[in-house]
Image: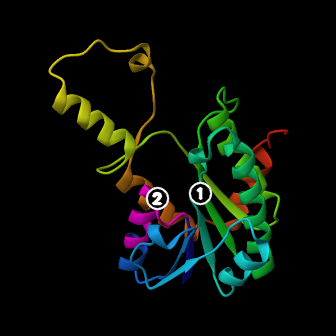
Amino acid sequence: MIIAIAGASGFVGRALTVQLLKSNHDVLAMHRSLKTAVASERTVVVDLGDEVSAARALAGVDAAFYLVHSMAAGDEFRDLDFRLATAFGRAASQAGVGRIIYVGALGDAPSSAHLSSRHEVGAALRSSGVDVVELRAAVVFGAGSISFEMLRYLTERLPAMVCPRWVRTRIQPIALLDLLAYLEQSLLVDPASTKLAARMSRPIAR
């Protein structure tokens, strides 16, 4: 199977690239900069906001993972994420991609801009008409992730600390290896079940 990974330079994207290559898939690693490129059978640098360029890169692809976020863009990240997802979905449709698999966020009524953006991205991808499998996860734990390294750094450097209020916040973490297994299995999910999930999921008004 020919599989594209948009966001291949991220924590999950790098690990997923290795996983799919081990499973003998033909992987197309999509990057926004050569500086972030990772080892893959094929690597392409493309502006995901450019539908024409993205569609050209996706030609012949069977399925695409969308693991892109724009938190580094500052206050404009929400609009940028929505625009990129909309363009990517349209490009995937034009290229005849059979399925998009996306990792979103938990919650039916998110209270933060970040979580709301994750839901909006899912709705933007679904609006393309391409079959979409959306997995919703909270914190992904694994060596190298921001959450993991932050906790490791704190416990190694500080013998004791006054904890902020957010340490009492309950979360539903998932191990990276488990997430990778679910992502790979999503390539084989019955399309009928994904259409049902799409009908049950409410897009967020902008």
Q: Residue at x 73, y 65 (%)?
A: 49
Mark 2 falls on what kind of element?
Answer: loop
Decide: marks 2, 1 in contact (CB < 8 A)? yes
Q: Position of residue 159 (x, y in %)?
A: 14, 21
Going by the image, does 197 lie left or right of 43? right
Report the predominant secondary structure element of the magenta stretch.
Answer: helix
Residue under numbered circle 2: 10
Q: Residues within 10 Å of mark 1 (few under 14, many from 20)?
A: many
The quadrant of the rendering that contains the C terminus is top right
**Residue 112's image quarter?**
top right
Q: Position of residue 39 (x, y in %)?
A: 38, 77
Question: Which residues make up the magenta segment?
Answer: 7-18
Classify 161 as above or below 105: above
The quadrant of the rendering that contains the N terminus is bottom right
**Residue 146's image quarter?**
top left
Going by the image, does 95 lie left or right of 34? right
Going by the image, does 92 lie left or right of 103? right
Mark 1 falls on what kind of element?
Answer: loop
Q: Is residue 137 magenta?
A: no
Residue 170 seen in the figure: yes
Residue under numbered circle 1: 68
Sequence-wise first label, 2 or 1: 2
Q: Residue at x 32, y 51 (%)?
A: 144
Q: What is the C-alpha distance between the residues marked 2 and 1?
A: 8 Å
Q: Position of residue 9 (x, y in %)?
A: 46, 64
Q: Amino acid at mark 2?
A: Gly
